[in-house]
Amino acid sequence: MIKINLLPPEERAKKKEFKLPEMSTMYLVAGVVIFFGVIVTSGIVQQHKIRTLKNKIEVAKEESRKLAPQLAKIKKISKEREEVNKRLELIASLDRYRYFRVKLLNDIGIKIPRNCWLTGVTEISPNNLNIEGIAFSNYTVADMITNLEKSPLFTRVDLNIAQRGKIKDRNVMKFKLSANVMPQ
C-alpha cells in the first residue's frame, strides 16, 4: 500500500531534526588537542614509572649480588649446624644407654638361681637376647625364667630349648632362653 500525502507542504507534519549546537572549529581543535595531550601525558607518566621500577630492580639485583657471599656462608653454617646436632643426638643416645648392658648383665647375674650356670649370652638385636645355660633340674630353669620375668629390664622371657644332657656322669638340663629387654 502506497501512501500519498496530498497536503500542501506548509501544512504537512514536520519531521523533528536533531541538530548539534554550532561549534566553532576552534573548540573542536581544542578538544582534540586536550584529548591527545591527556594520552601523551599518561604515556610520559607510565614511562617514568617504568624507569623508576627498572632502577629499583637494578638496585635490588646489586644488593642481592653484594649479599650472595653472606647468604652462602649462612647456608653453609646452617648445614654444619644440622650435622653437629645429628652428632650430638647420637652421642646423647649412646650416653643414655651407656650403662644399660652393664645393668642388664648384673641383673642376669643376680637372678641366676643356685645350681644354674650360664654358658652364653648373645645380643640378637638391641632389644633381644638369647641366654644359654646349664642347670641340675627343670625347676631350676623355671626359677631362672620366673626371676628374669620379675625384673623391670625384661619384658618377655621364653624357653626355646630344654634338653637333658650329661657332664661327667652328672645329669644336667641344657636350656636356651630368648628374652626381650627394655632399656631404662
Image (cartoon, rainbow, N blue to C red):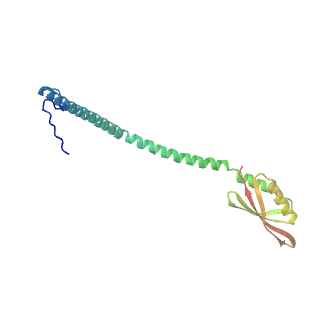
Q: How many marks?
A: 0
Q: Residue at x 22, y 33 (%)?
A: 39
Taking depth in this image into account, of 33 and 24 the one nearest to the observer is 24
Q: Quadrant of residue 29?
A: top left
Q: Position of residue 169 (x, y in %)?
A: 87, 73
x, y (%) of residue 75?
45, 44
Q: Position of residue 71 (x, y in %)?
A: 41, 41
Nearer to me, 22 or 2:
2
The quarter of the picture where residue 121 lies is bottom right
Q: Is residue 37 left or right of residue 161?
A: left
Task: Examine the rendered structure and indicate whether residue 157 appears above or below residue 28.
Answer: below
| Pick the front one: 94 or 181 | 181
The residue located at (56%, 48%) in the rendering is 86
Question: Whole-percent x and y of residue 145?
Answer: 81, 60
Q: Residue at x 74, y 52 (%)?
A: 103
* Quarter assignment of residue 157: bottom right
Going by the image, does 63 lie left or right of 112?
A: left
- Can you say which quadrant of the picture contains the N terminus? top left
